[in-house]
Amino acid sequence: MSSSVFFGSATLAYFIAMMLYISYLAFRKSAVGMIATTITVAGFLSQTAAILMRWGEFAEIGQMGLIRAVPLTNLYESLIFFVWCLILAYLVIEFKYKNRSFGAFITPIAALALAFIDLSGMSKNIQPLVPALQSNWLLAHVMMSFISYALFAISFSTGLMYLIVRSEKKNEPSYIFWTVTFGIFLSTLIAMGLDFMTFRVAFMGKQELIKSYLFRATFRNESSAVVMLSFAATAGLIFVIWRFGDLLKRIILSFNISAELLDELTYKSIAIGFPIFTLGGLIFGAIWADQAWGKYWTWDPKETWSLITWFFYAFFLHSRLMRGWKGRRVAAVAVLGFVAVIFTYLGVNLLLSGLHSYGSQ
Amino acid sequence: MTENNKGIFDRIWDIFASVKLAVVIFALISATSIVGTIIEQQADPEKNIKVLVKMFGFDHETAYNVLGVLHKLGFTDMYHSWWFLLFLLLFAANLIICSLDRLPRILKLVQEKIHPVPVDYLEKMSVRRSISIKGKAAGVRERVSAAVKDIGFSASESAEGQALQFYAEKGNYTRLGVYITHLSILVILAGAIIGIFFGYNAFLNLPEGDVSSVAYQDKGREVSLGFDIRCDDFEVEYYPNSEMPKAYKSWLSVLKNGQVVMQKPIVVNDPLKYEGITFYQSSYGIHPDGYGRGMVVLRAAAKDGRSEQINIRVGEKFTIPGTTVEAHIKDFSPALTFNEMGRANTFSEHMINPAVYIEFYDKGVQKFSGWILKRNPKSWELPDGNRVEFVDMWGVQYTGMQVRKDPGVFIVYLGCIIMSVGLYMSFFMSHRRLWVSVLEEKGSVKVIVGASANRNRASLERRIDKLMNALQSDQKGGK
């Protein structure tokens, strides 16, 4: 059996778990919650097996040792690993805080990310490593970067939920901030979905880089009418979220999630993610760059954006520890920090050029 | 003292000690860096005009003017501009002053020894527990002492009348973690400055067989190495049956006064280092003089096992050792492939699969002819049982190397280690304080526990619960 079977069952499991978690929230039957957890764990194990199998296959094809054959060398593999980290972090939270409510928010992200991989038709082939990536640092640098990305993703969701819960009036800055952020986030996802639906049918070419058709169906369309319409639709979506945002607040509150818990989770995931990001992302990255390129820091777009991300979270920690800032302002920083993370991970590869161009295929 | 009475020095100090300035500097560095990631640095202006046209929809004229303004402001090479260095300097100054500003208070906290507190203070602690144990205070005292030791604290004891108190603390020095992290950033910046002033980055394209005693910096400036470097061979290895490169490999020799003092093959991720100068595999290419200057290296092996290495040029001929078979090299291709019709054609200018076309004669009569390809060992076998192996096409390719001297890099690495230690102390350790009061009551003894931690209270709480469980089970076991 090949790894793809296990990847497939993991995707399926996360989809079923997503539906179960949502119905658990709706009906509050603890048996449903138990099944949801069991299926998530099963999906996680299956995905773990799949990653390990791919690792083995990779080592065989690339004719190299296991340490260097870590399957984290392109966009497909990195997304898979990101989902794996996310589910792991979620399971830890579920067992530690004895709260299943987050499942309804995390499993959809996992399931959608995996479905996105399938829909996008990005290359799933195992490709041998190019010379620049043949290093033992690949394992530590990339793996730790993605673990921190997953932790930052969690702080983003809990930070956003915190803002939703804590905002009272529709004209408050924090209310406007979260509705706009959430609206942009959703419309970006929808726009990417539209890209795939449009261009998968038109090109059917798997070799086509995502880069070349990102937002071409909407914001970067040739027809300016479509572009205008896309922006209008985004504005409309933001308005709808703004108008009915308090509904979301009531839903979250009814799920037994308190603002204090959200604040703590935001802080904890950043307090763990930040040192991992510093060590694995920045320090190990610098040492590797020094070995491969002869420069530990080149102000390459990826490096620069990691530094910007690092500043955001350093600011988050300082504002919380030093100035006693708590609550909404800090949560907003956590949310913005993740925007920088997304740009570091995807934006740089898709929009800018530089040395770190491995992930764009 | 009001704000107005402060001296100018104090005011400047206060500005530099504030987190607000840090935020402003973070924002300045980030915002300008974003521009720096969009505008390609030290690049051809045409390239950046294209970027501006594509990203912002400017027409060519506007893009040209915008780029002109950006160039004047230093954004086309912003990481070397005076204002970006100023931001970094401000960042360093802010870091130093805000650390110095807070350090005395923290040092006091670190050095201050824990002392006993009145019992009613314990009730205000962030972690507090109490339990009543039957028995005499003297017996309970032993048990408390043992249990406190069990959870990893070494406690002091104080007795005031009837009240007995144990007090202990751990990890007071971890409060310095933040300052160690700040220090590490300064160490890294210092390492970077040393690198800028005492090191260089240069480049060297060295054809196979050539020797150089210099490398080249920007604008063709020569920098002397202090020794000679020779490229003995360069090769691109490919994955089997594919055009995907597996390794770029240069065999280098270091020479001093004509003597070879070091030899090492380098690949990407594995450079050669000699006397503080490091050579990195960075690129490769074909010598401008082309394939004409190359030497074909073959190994001819006769049926009887005798073999010999042949260095030969296209147009020349050789004899297979111990036989009368003569080979005439007629043609060369850097990348040969056969199409469906079986016809040979060259598909690349790069040496992906070099091959030579050889005609074989025996006593003046042409016997057979064909292509011998480097990556197809089957093509090496001749119909008469002899063999001609393709070893290399030598002297045509050059290896492109990054040449670097950076005496600051060790300091940067040291800074990285300090940073890891500092972050670990700041995030995964904490300063914990514990007080345990033992009070004699009628027929029983009351034990009151109060504890605090500057972070990660939950893990302290788990330890205190362990302590309480130990005391409780002792009680059951004893009675």
Image (cartoon, rainbow, N blue to C red):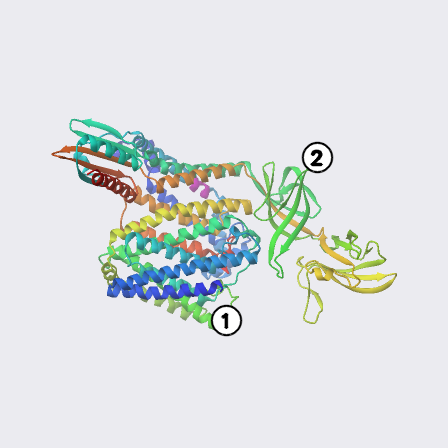
Nearer to us in this view, B55 or A127: A127
Nearer to us in this view, B439 or A284: B439
**Against A84, is B73 above or below?**
above
Q: Mark 1 points at which residue?
A: A204
Residue A74 within the magenta-colored segment of the rendering: no
Extreme residue in the left direction = B442
* Image: magenta residue range: B83-89
Q: Mark 2 points at which residue?
A: B257
Residue under the image location 35 percent in, 33 percent down: B100
> Do the numbered discs 2 and 1 sit on residues whose CB atoms are within 8 Å?
no
Question: CA–CA distance between discs 2 and 1?
Answer: 63 Å
Q: Is mark 1 on a helix, strand or loop?
A: loop
Q: Do the residues at discs 2 and 1 belong to one chain?
A: no
Locate residue B115, reporting x and y percent. Answer: 24, 29
| Left or right position of B230 against B184 | right
Quadrant occupied by the N terminus of chain B: top left
Extreme residue in the bottom direction = A201
| Left or right position of A156 against B378 | left
On the image, which quarter does residue B403 sit in? Answer: top right
Give me the chain letter of mark 1.
Answer: A
Locate residue A309, reporting x and y percent. Answer: 40, 50
Residue under the image location 83 percent in, 65 percent down: B367
Answer whether residue A235 is visible to the viewer in this image: no
| Left or right position of A81 against A33 | right
Q: Is mark 2 on a helix, strand or loop?
A: loop
**Against B100, is A246 above or below?**
below
Locate residue A130, reporting x and y percent. Answer: 56, 55
